[in-house]
Image (cartoon, grey):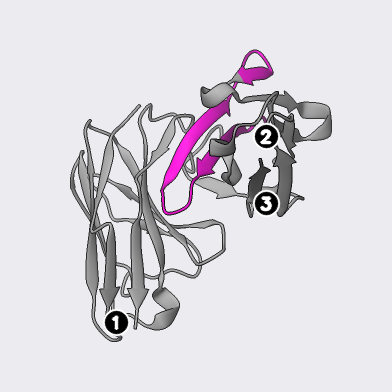
Amino acid sequence: AQSVTQPDIHITVSEGASLELRCNYSYGATPYLFWYVQSPGQGLQLLLKYFSGDTLVQGIKGFEAEFKRSQSSFNLRKPSVHWSDAAEYFCAVGASYGGSQGNLIFGKGTKLSVKP
Amino acid sequence: SAVISQKPSRDICQRGTSLTIQCQVDSQVTMMFWYRQQPGQSLTLIATANQGSEATYESGFVIDKFPISRPNLTFSTLTVSNMSPEDSSIYLCSVDTAGLGNTIYFGEGSWLTVV
């Protein structure tokens, strides 16, 4: 069965520092992979996605993620964190074929706090 | 991208009542999805709603509790029936704009508190 693991429940980084949020997935084929951000009191905003091609994908707000098939990972990175990045981040995997296209399996989320 | 509007954005509901959440999309989409996010938890898929067919429910969710309508390609409703405090959650509508499973957007969510 598909699953997503975000091993870090809560991460705190200083403003201006680099960030890496980890995501590992379990899926039998090449998955569709997504990162979403949820700010307090808000819905989910799509940061970036991977479904084929270049394994390094660029997203909005200066985020990027790298798909590593050998490690079943899709880690999210940002070179310099801003205070406004404080939010909860969710990694999700979707089926790349078949009738379940479009429904996503989410990780438990990583809450990011940013120190001034 | 897609603009997805949900109503209500927030509500406080009495135990035993039912509430219908609306989801409106600014473009025609084949596949729409309803998710639940319980407090402090991740998102769980409730059901898939495709226009012209019955909604498909995930394990643990039943039509009597969460009836869904999908009258056209831009609109869907989710009803939370006979609510209890355990139904206090954020309910989110999402759409697959490309129809290929790789372009998924979410609404802002409907925050329900059951008292």
| Residue B58 pos. (x, y %) | 47, 61
Q: Which residue lies under the disc numbered 1? A: B82
Q: Is residue A88 visible?
A: yes
Work out how far the residue at label 3 is from the one at label 2, CA to CA, in angstroms. 38 Å
Q: Foreground mark, 2 or 1?
A: 2
| Co-location on one chain, circles 3 and 2 | yes
- List the residue tagged with mark 2: A15
Residue A116, located in which quarter of the rendered image? top right
Secondary structure beneath label 2: loop
| Residue in the foreground of this view, choosing between A39 and B8 | A39
Distance, label 2 to label 1, CA atoms, is: 46 Å
Which residue is pictured at 29% across the width and 62% down the height? Answer: B10
Residue A90 in the figure: left or right of residue B113: right
Indicate yes or no whether the magenta region holds residue B101: no
**Who comes first in sequence, dot 3 or dot 2?**
3
Q: Is residue A95 visible?
A: no
Residue topped by disc 3: A1
Q: Is residue A46 magenta?
A: yes
- Residue B65 location, x and y as percent? 33, 74
- Amino acid under disc 2: Glu
Residue B102, percent from left and from top: 49, 29
First to last magenta residue range: A30-57
Q: Amino acid at mark 1?
A: Asn
Q: Position of residue B4 (x, y in %)?
A: 28, 40
